[in-house]
Amino acid sequence: MAEPESGRTSLTFDSPLARELADLSSRRRALDAVSVDFSGDPRVITVSNQKGGVGKTTTTVNLAASLASLGARVLVIDLDPQGNASTALGVPHSADVPSVYDVLIDQFPLSDIVQESPESPNLLCAPSTIHLAGAEIELVSQVAREHRLRTAVEDYLATSEQRVDFVLIDCPPSLGLLTINAFTAAHELLIPIQCEYYALEGLSQLLGSVSMIQKHLNNRLHLSTILLTMYDGRTRLAQQVAEEVRSHFPNEVLRAVIPRSVRVSEAPSFGQTVIAYDGQSAGAVAYREAAVEIARRASSTTQDNKGEA
Ligand SMILES: Nc1ncnc2c1ncn2[C@@H]1O[C@H](COP(=O)(O)OP(=O)(O)OP(=O)(O)O)[C@@H](O)[C@H]1O
Ligand SMILES: [Mg+2]
């Protein structure tokens, strides 16, 4: 019976929870002091994994919001007919809204469809509508079907009145023509990996598709970043998956790991990213740390690839 009492004492001073909270508040302070230079070339990053539900959309919108809060101007391209990224960014995407479908099929310029997220003037979104579900099939018979998005992004970056630092593309869970358009348009691939059983399943197929794209369609594309998502540090499985992924990809895996967090999963139902919804929560702090790492890798990645471009 004495246990709850002593449990409470140790919770206050030296329990794992108390240590976790102290750690979180020092990480928040460190983030508040961060400044990042965004003077480099725009970076086009596709967030892809043909596995469903691994955190692609959550990662895209929360990294975009984190980068925007650091001062970057970020365009999110919602390339998934489900339109989840548009929802999370609070951007209207009903069937009558001009969307990525019009860009891919009718070659509208991106500037005609891009909307500002209510969250920040630095956060832009090219929305997806339900029409995009048909684009995969309609594209098959079109000229330059794999290059449609790349041409649109290049034109947008060349003509945009305001600078754009990042373009993040949220892909559907498949390796069809929509994802191929994203691979052809991007410089970098970011793979979110869920810290669960079967995490690495399908990864070799994904990387195989990437080498085909590098060979035939886009030699700039490279796997720059892996982000571990939905990490539950209390389970041995999550720790084992994280260790295994890090041993295979020591340079690509970010130090930041995204914890499984209720705040992260609630935010989209308010049409918000977790950065706006609860920017001090553990999930938001982890996404903000991941964004700083990605932004700081900018100069070396850009310089490394300048020679190849
Ligand atoms: N860190 C997290 N903690 C808790 N829930 C999360 C976290 N990340 C994502 N989720 C939830 O997991 C589900 C899948 O996430 P998300 O939609 O981002 O995956 P996805 O890879 O984009 O899925 P799809 O393949 O369908 O496009 C969502 O309900 C999301 O809210
Ligand atoms: Mg998604």
Image (cartoon, helix red, strand yellow):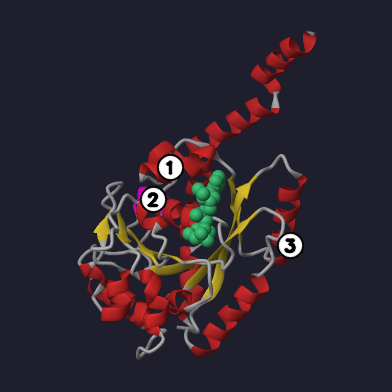
Please report the bounds of the magenta region as a residue range: 66-71
Give the number of the disc on residue 247. 3
Give the amino acid type for the residue marked by disc 2 in the picture.
Ala
| Among the two numbered marks 1 and 3 on one chain, the one whose residue lies closer to the N terminus | 3
The answer to whether residue 296 is visible is no
Q: Position of residue 219 (x, y in %)?
A: 50, 84
The residue labelled by disc 2 is 88
Give the amino acid type for the residue marked by disc 3 in the picture.
Ser
Q: Is residue 68 magenta?
A: yes
The residue labelled by disc 1 is 267
Give the amino acid type for the residue marked by disc 1 in the picture.
Ala
Query: Are the residues flagged by discs 2 and 1 in contact, CB closer than 8 Å?
Result: yes
Q: Residue at x 46, y 67 (%)?
A: 171
Q: Nearer the viewer, residue 302 or 133?
A: 133
| Among the two numbered marks 2 and 3 on one chain, the one whose residue lies closer to the N terminus | 2
Q: Position of residue 201 (x, y in %)?
A: 69, 66
Compute the Cα span from label 1 to label 3.
Answer: 32 Å
Element class at badge 1:
helix
Q: Position of residue 121 (x, y in %)?
A: 26, 51
Q: Residue 21 vs residue 144: left or right?
A: right
